[in-house]
Image (cartoon, rainbow, N blue to C red):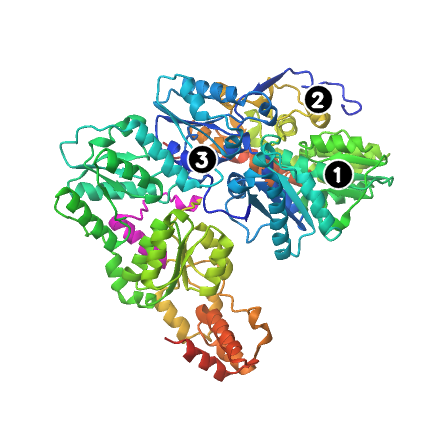
Amino acid sequence: MTTPGQISKGCTQTPVLRERGQHEVFCGLTSIIWLHRMMPDSFFLVVGSRTCAHLLQSAAGVMIFAEPRFGTAILEETDLAGMSDAQDEIDREVDRLLSRRADIRRLFLVGSCPSEVIKLDLAKAAERLNARYAPKIRVLNFTGSGIETTFTQGEDSCLAAMVAAMPSSDTAGLVIAGGLPDVVQDQMLDLLDRIGVKDVRLLPNRSSDEEFGIGPNTHVAFVQPFLGETYDILVRRGAHPVSAPFPFGEQGTTAWLKAIASRFGISSDHVDAVTEPARLRARKAVAQASEPLDGKRVFLLPDSQLEVPLARFLSRECGMELVEVGTPYLHRDLVGCDLAQIADCPTLSEGQDVEKQLDRVRAARPDLTVCGLGLANPLEAEGLATKWAIELVFSPIHFYEQAGDLAGLFARPLRRRAMLQVAAE
Amino acid sequence: MKLSVWTYEGPPHVGAMRVATAMNGLHYVLHAPQGDTYADLLFTMIERRNHRPPVTYTTFQARDLGSDTAKLFRDACQAAYERFKPQAMIVGASCTAELIQDDPGGLGAALGLPIPVIPLELPSYQRKENFGADETFLQIVRTLAKPTDRSARVSCNLIGPTALGFRHRDDITEITALLNDMGVEVNVTAPYGATPADITRLGAAHFNVLMYPETGESACRWMERTLDQPYTRTIPIGVGATKDFVEEVAALTGCIPRLDTDRLRLPWYSASVDSTYLTGKRVFIFGDGTHVATATRIAREEMGFEVVGIGCFNREMARPIRALAKDIGVEALISDDYLEVEGRISNLAPELILGTQMERHIGKRLGIPCAVISAPVHVQDFPARYSPQMGVEGANVIFDTWVHPLVMGLEEHLLHMFREDPEFNDAAGPSHHAHGAKQVSDAPDPIGAQIIWLDEAERELRKVPFFVRGKARRNTEAFAEARGDSQISVETLYEAKAHYAR
């Protein structure tokens, strides 16, 4: 799946270290934190335990919203006794919720570890509730459970459920798959428009009124690398994926735009001409922001599945040396182009055994370790600079105008260490 | 099934983590899926801990369910023992693992490790975080503490402080110094900072100081029965309670009651004239039972506030909080549903909330100032400076913390006198806060929507101080509605005022 003209195989042949030990990652429920903001007419109802509710609250940065558009129907002892009960309970909680929240047009029932272990059938619940509330409210279900999904896979699972519910259509057009902050989405649509790509649809869409169909004339470009299941179902429904590196940094964005342009018969020269000022701006911003990164060694722990595209950006555009690139899953259909552009990666790992991986971090003593929030302060206390990976899924980092900011996110911990003159004990 | 948006307490295994993380040389093997590892960040981010919680998660996945999750658990225990070499281990299940019934306790014991392996039974679908901490510590104490000779000098154990506790770190320092001043040594502080070896020495103390009933009461009761150690009932938060605590310790030990009040400033600050404006301020108090009970006493006896409502989120404390509410003539709210708490606050329209981070957000929304007195904690509740709640310095800290969100004394008088002036308008808020504080919403209530305010009455209402205006509006509307009036005149306004005046 390399782009035409790609000669080097990069790291596509690098043997992958597969690990199956303790995983130090969030579950897919965490995706709800950004998904609910991208779909303002939706409510995400997790059917789970107190732990699920506590996770959402902790990951959301503790109680920031008035009454957020997500919540947890907490299973209690009585629900665990009999199944028919639990289905009635879901109906009751949903009725109560929808009567209080008249603004809700889409309701997602989200499966969790406990709901899956007790085999609570949320598809059945969604079907029944749909019959009751359609067409005013659409009810879908997906899993965010930690026994099935890791962190960003919750978004994947949600988008796949949305695709499955879409009508079929022969209309030609481009679908952009993957959630983005509004500001970035607008920039992207503007870029595509100026290049000459029309009829762009977004998945997820901001409103259920913007529904569209999928079929053999649909082309799909991905802006997030963690959408493996969504990729598969789109392909099954006849859509044609555009293979490209992900639009991080100047090079990634240009390659991504050119891959789409080529699909629609638009020349590479035209893309160059249209994007020249933005490319120059991005290149200058990256050069400036990445100065502290040049020649430094980076270790990426598995977290969001953004690791491979980011490793490409850091090594190709910021001059960093890769020590290890870890990812929860290596979906080659999606990250193959990025992998091909990484010249050298000593260790490529999939899955995790956190203790062993931390031993490798300590042995390598990288200049920067990209990791989850649970590990960041302990590593800092061991004298290792870290970048919290979760910021990468919450911050605008895609496309030309954010390329400098993206480099800046990685450079800031190093700049900060250089500034501080008092040592932490 | 119960819909929950924000929760006051996590699941019970998070309580167990608070105990394990507070201790040294103890390891927790938790049978749990990968998502449960989020709990690490509570400790490393909120509390800024510089090491990972000593927890190994089995992180089983869906594909493991068909095969052998029990083996996964055994392997995780063995690997954790070999890597961390703890003095003791606690083993248990999170909510999901509880459903697959692998019996972590039995599996852990069967491994034959050369250290104590303590099984935890924490019912995830019935109980919550505080129970988890209390029960975990009880099991550790039951397993490890043995009768032993009392120390030569009078000594006690400090029981209850955990990781992620509200100011536990500084309360330990304050109470240790207070006891030392009386000639009482601290034998062991636990769980905070204790090792399993320390737990075996608990019996050497002459008595126990129960600092936080939420997390230490079961262990204290057990030690009272089994090790013949009495424990203190007074929680030394506030001036009166600290003095009572000193008397209680003296009575238990025969030491002379002694409290160094040189640095105690709350009583004078409260008596000084600038504090006159605190008189009768209407406060609503909500949090964990222990902090609510102590705050209620301080509010009434040491700050001169009027307590208009109290409540707690932990059902275990429902009885004492209900009794206290009855004593002071208010209604208790026992609930972990923050919407219910918000509703109560909105109805009572207090001038100050003493609550948790949750009430701080409710206060922000309703435009009511709030000071935080209790867990659940936030990164703000771990200040760099010394900031206890207990003892003499705790009382000083509490005075400052509670007064800070309010408009200062003289400033409030000026607001009354010059409220028409642009510099002193209602929207200006306390001058020591950079942001413009939001005002109590005095927008019409839905119930009163059909009642019309005449212009003149509306103008008169604007003259009522802003922080009670919302309540004045609601009271007047309720009064008018009860009388069957369809419009409100100035006269109605003042009749309502007279009606509600006590």
What is the x, y in percent for residue A321?
58, 22
Can residue B384 be found in the magenta stretch?
yes
Query: Are the residues under badges 1 and 2 in a single subunit?
Result: yes
Query: A124 or B5, which lies in front?
Result: A124
Up the image or down, A59 lies above or below B330; here it is: above
What is the x, y in percent for residue B365?
51, 58
Q: Which residue is mark 3?
A: B13
Q: Which residue is mark 1?
A: A163
Up the image or down, A296 lies above or below A115; here it is: above
Callout 2: chain: A
Question: Which region of the structure is painted magenta?
Answer: B379-403
The amino acid beneath tag 2 is: Ala
Q: Which residue is situated farthest in the bottom direction here?
A: B491
| Separation of marks 2 and 3 at Cα, in angstroms | 44 Å
Mark whose residue sits in front, 1 or 2:
1
Query: A1 or B111, which lies in front?
Result: B111
Callout 1: chain: A
The amino acid beneath tag 3 is: His
Can residue A168 be found in the magenta stretch?
no
Q: Residues within 10 Å of mark 1 (few under 14, many from 20)?
A: many
Name the residue: 45% across, 75% down.
B464
| Separation of marks 1 and 2 at Cα, in angstroms | 29 Å
Name the residue: 49% across, 65% down.
B439
Up the image or down, A275 lies above or below B355; here it is: above
Up the image or down, A65 lies above or below A29; here it is: below
What is the x, y in percent for residue B366?
50, 61
The reply to whether residue B93 is visible in this rendering is yes
Q: Which residue is mark 2?
A: A340
Q: Quadrant of residue A8?
A: top right
> How would you classify the magenta stretch by its main secondary structure?
helix
User: Quadrant of the image for the C terminus of chain B?
Assistant: bottom left
| Separation of marks 1 and 3 at Cα, in angstroms | 37 Å
